[in-house]
Structures are given as structure tokens and as C-alpha cells.
Amino acid sequence: MHADPPPLPAHRVARFLFTGALAALGLWILWDFLPSLIWATVFAVATWPLYDRFRRVMPGAGEGTVLAPLAFTLVVGCVFLVPLVTMGIALGREALFVARFLPSLEETGVPLPDWLGELPLAGGYVARWWQNNLADPHAVTELLGRLDRGTVVDWTREIGTQLARRSTVLIFTLLTLFFLYRDGDGLVRQLEDLAVALVGPQGRRVGVHMVLAVRGTVNGLVLVGLAEGLLLGMAYLLLGVPHPALFGGSTAVLGMIPFGAPVVFGIASLVLLAQSGVVPAAILLGLGTVVVFVADHFVRPALIGGAVKLPFLWVLLGILGGLEAFGLVGLFLGPAVMAALIALWREWTALARRAAAAD
């Protein structure tokens, strides 16, 4: 019979309890700042190779100075702030246009497009609905009158609150990013020592896999999304979609999320269908489908999973599951967690095979 293991000493139990309570208290204190900390970590991991090159060539950026981390943090801030401010201005102009356009509809209505009744299957039904609800100015007035003014005001206030909150997150993200750039080398060594102490010799390799997964995810989501926005933005311009810059920017932003870009070019296709007819809308819809299919099935899996040899299924599950669990930041955390799990699985199965071969 095996003897029962000796009980843990009282001082070790007390130390574990104290450490757990202290960690829980720290997590509770930092809870509202966790999004900023996580985003700063993602940015630091993704841009560290560029920052390392930057500080090597920057004059006066020696060890312990703040010049290089401060300058690079400002660069990263401008890279992300300028597109957000530009899109905000564009959205503000569009909202002003809509605000001025809606009252004119109450006087003139929306004319019925000639081609709408010729659509197969539902063309007659859609044309009758349009004629009864949009072409008649009195019907438009009644339709717009159903909008609850109080609800619109509440939406406006909520948008303002969210913008203020996101701005605060962005400020603390940049502040944290500066300190990560400044103290990143020492922090990496500490994390490597901690990983080895907790997981064993394979802890360092697991950490490397997580870092590569985050960088690959940034490349696969952000860069591919920007490429989709650029390509489809040119298509919007050439095919005559109104406000092509706004549609292109929206495609780039939503293109960072899997299956997000089809929402934008689908709406653009409907707008083009209403203005120019079936052929330009079909061209845009087909071109958008091809671009997104190639990006989601070939480019993204190669960029995200190729660095750590992560199967596409686990890449997709990590992205979608991370988005569902943690929001937008989960797009980057999900693949990193999947990469760590796959790395541990491979390490442990390799150890099991070597142990079985040795017996």
C-alpha cells in the first residue's frame, strides 16, 4: 500500500492563500484598466521587431533612455489615431448629410427606380411596398414620425459616452505601451524565468509560440483587412459607389474581423443596384466575394498559422471564440491561447513517445 503524502506545512498554505488573495485584490483594482493593458501588450508584441530596428538606428537612443520608446509610442499613436479621426470626421459629415436629407424626403418622397419592378420573383412586391411607403411624401412623413425622438437622443448620448470611454482606453494604452517599450527587455527575461518555473523547460518555447501567434494574427487580421479595404475601395471608386472613401475605410475596419467585409460590400452592392443597375452591382459583389475568399482561406491562414504551424481550424476557432469571449481584443488573444495549447500538446505527446520508447 502507498503511504499518504505528507500534509503541506502551515506556512506554505498561508503563503498560497495570501498570494491568491493579493492577486485577486490586484486584479479587482486593475479591472477597469485591463483592456488598456491587454491592448498595449498586443501592440508591443506585434511591433517589437520594428521598435528594435527603430531604436538601433535612432541617435541618442541608448540603454535606459526614454527617447526611443517615447518617439515610437508617438508614431504608433499617430498611425492609429489619424485613421480613427479621419473616419470620425467622415461619419460626422455623413450624419449631417442624413440629418439634412431626411426632412426633404417628407416633401418629395423617394422616387421608385424603374428597374425595381423588373426584378425576378419579388420585384412586384418590393415595388408596391416602395410605392406605398417611400414614394408618397405623406407615407414617408408617417414612417419617419414613428421614430422615437427620445430614443435617438439616448443613442446620441450613448455614442458620446462610448467615445469618451474609448478615448480613455486609448490614452492609457499608449501610456502602458511606452513603459513596455522602455522596460520590455527586462520584462521578457522575467516572464521567461516565470514560465520555466511554472511549466518547465518547455515554458520558454510555449511563450515563443504565443508571441509568434500574436504577431501572425496582427499581420493576418490588420494588414489583410487594410489590403481588402484598399482593393475594394478602388472598386467602389471605379464602379461609382457614392462616398468610396467611407466605404473603403469601413471595409478595412470590418475586414479585420472574419466575414466582416461582406457586410460592407454587400451594402455597397445594394446602393449600386439602386443607382446604376444590376450589372455594376453584380460586378462589385463578385469581386468582393473573390477578394474575401482568397484572403480568408489562403492569406490569413498562412500568416496566422504558418508561423507556429497552427491548423486553420484552430486559427478560426481561436479568432471567433476569442471575439465572442473577450470582444475585439479576443481576436488576438484567441489564436495566442490556441497556439499555447497546441504547443503544450505537442511537447507532452513528444515526452510520452520518448518515455514509451525508453521502456
Image (cartoon, rainbow, N blue to C red):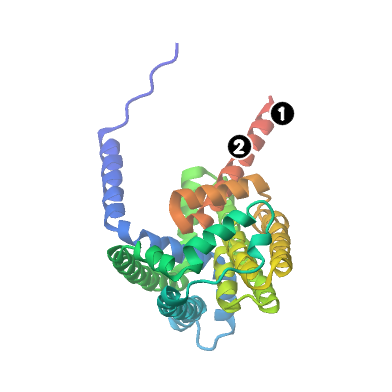
User: Taking 304 as reference, is 137 left or right?
Assistant: left
Give the image location of residue 200, x and y in percent.
53, 44
Quadrant of the drawing holding the C terminus: top right
**Camera-side residue of 203 and 83:** 83
- CB of mark 2 within 8 Å of CB of mark 1? no
- Can you name the residue that lies furthest to the bottom here? 59
Give the image location of residue 269, x and y in percent.
64, 66
- Label 2 to label 1: alpha-carbon separation: 14 Å
Q: In which quarter of the image is residue 152?
A: bottom left
User: Taking 152 as reference, is 116 left or right?
Assistant: right
What residue lies at 42% left-to-right and 80% top-to-bottom? 100
**Camera-side residue of 67 and 268:** 268
Mark in front: 2 vs 1: 2
Q: Disc 1 marks which amino acid?
A: Ala
User: Taking 83 as reference, is 20 left or right?
Assistant: left
Q: Using the image, determine if residue 159 lies above or below residue 303.
A: below
> Which one is earlier in the sequence, the residue at label 2 or at label 1?
2
Tell me the element at label 1.
Answer: helix
Quadrant of the drawing holding the N terminus: top left
Give the image location of residue 174, x and y in percent.
41, 73
Residue 64 visible in this rendered orientation of the protein: no
Give the image location of residue 85, x and y in percent.
45, 79
Q: In which quarter of the image is residue 270?
A: bottom right
Circle 1 residue:
357
Circle 2 residue:
348
